[in-house]
Amino acid sequence: MSSSSHLEKLEASLGRARSSIREAAKVRNKTSTHQDPDYVPRGPIYRNPNAFHRSYLEMEKLFKIYVYEEGQVPIFHDGPCFHMYLTEGRFIHEMENGKLYRTTDPNQALVYFLPFSVVRMVQFLYLPDTYDRNGLKLAVIDYINLIAHKHPFWNRSLGADHFMLSCHDWGPFTTAFVPHLFHKSIRVLCNANTSEGFNPSKDASLPEIKLLTPEIPRLGGQPPSKRSTLAFFAGGLHGHIRYLLLNEWKGKDQDVLVYEKVPHGVSYEEMMKSSKFCLCPSGYEVASPRVVEAIYAECVPVLISDGYIPPFSDVLDWKSFSVQVPVKNISDIKNILMSISNRQYLRMQRRLKQVQRHFLMNGPPKRYDVFHMIVHSIWLRRLNIRIQDLLST
């Protein structure tokens, strides 16, 4: 079969999937009508549970990802699997070593993965404190030129059905070296900042998760009745938003406990597990691992940022299980939280238990966990693209 015939067949299957998802979205009570042995999405944590479930099942049936084989370890095909940037490394490792969604036939693929690690680029190609990022620039430009000359797929769509993934602060900056990579490709980024060119219609927000061991962290904490602290934060003075938060609240209130460093003998983890709300301000960049830490601890996250698009926002209704506070309202945080009734707080806290499954890093991945949700975010953006329309422009 010719490559054009393959493409027509793939686009036809996507057309049917779009139609199926649109029909599912029309279900009046939005409750999923589909059978599933593992999990049936339901409830207000979802924008539309039925549409999400239909989309997820269509993804499992149709979605194929081709991983370019060009490039050498450690810059390509590798990444960090622990600490701050693990979502980048774990995803790369799963695509390289797992069997989920991957195809070795590029003509069967719906998207093409550019398997470079920005974390590894910074580690091996950047000399600290020099501000010389020319090595990163050359690596990205050379790689795109290589695959564009060796394969037909980049030029066919100008990169629109290609994706990269990065949890490093410099992820967005690195893509700017290739205009089509920045403006057309699907960029899956922890630093999902609309003020820096993040485009939610084609880019996907990646959760920042910090784990020091391979084990899944202990979930949950004190029951709501025993969570004696209204709000908690502890973290370094990284960026303007943190400065405003610490300046306004550090050591000034018994209900809103804000520290630059937790006091001696006090456990950071236990403080999260015994607080009602966990403050999650942006640092130098918009994303913070505290958001997922709060979800794990069943401490309602309070997102303090401007321009940040939370992960999986196409599917999840963040307002149902978190509080979002604009930076200009930092001084009013206590009033905002105190205005939330106990009944509403209990609903939000209960929903955190349900949403946890979508942020768990399992090995190997389990259906509906963070790996599958990342892939689903990419799938949704591929549904927005019609390659044949791009060919005709």
Image (spheres, rainbow, N blue to C red):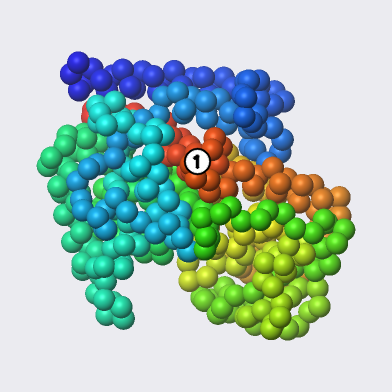
Q: Amino acid at mark 1?
A: Pro
CA neighbours of label 1 inside 10 A, class few (<14), some (14 to 19), many (20+)? some
Q: Is residue 213 above or below residue 94?
A: below
Kindly identify which residue carries mark 1.
365
Counting from the top left corner in percent of width and height, residue 111 is at: 33, 35
- Using residue 17 as the reference point, say whether residue 141 is left or right of it: left
> Which quadrant, please, contains the C terminus?
top left
Residue at horizontal 41 percent and vertical 64 percent from the top: 169
Instruction: Out of 63 and 343, give the one closest to the viewer.
Output: 63
Q: Write the residue at 47% across / 27% down.
A: 60
Residue shown at 55% from the left, 79% from the top: 237
**Residue 380 can be seen in this image:** yes
In this rendering, position of residue 274 left or right of residue 133: right
Q: Quadrant of residue 272?
A: bottom right
Q: Element under label 1?
A: loop
Q: Position of residue 115 (x, y in %)?
A: 30, 48
The spot of residue 280 in percent (x, y) is 62, 65
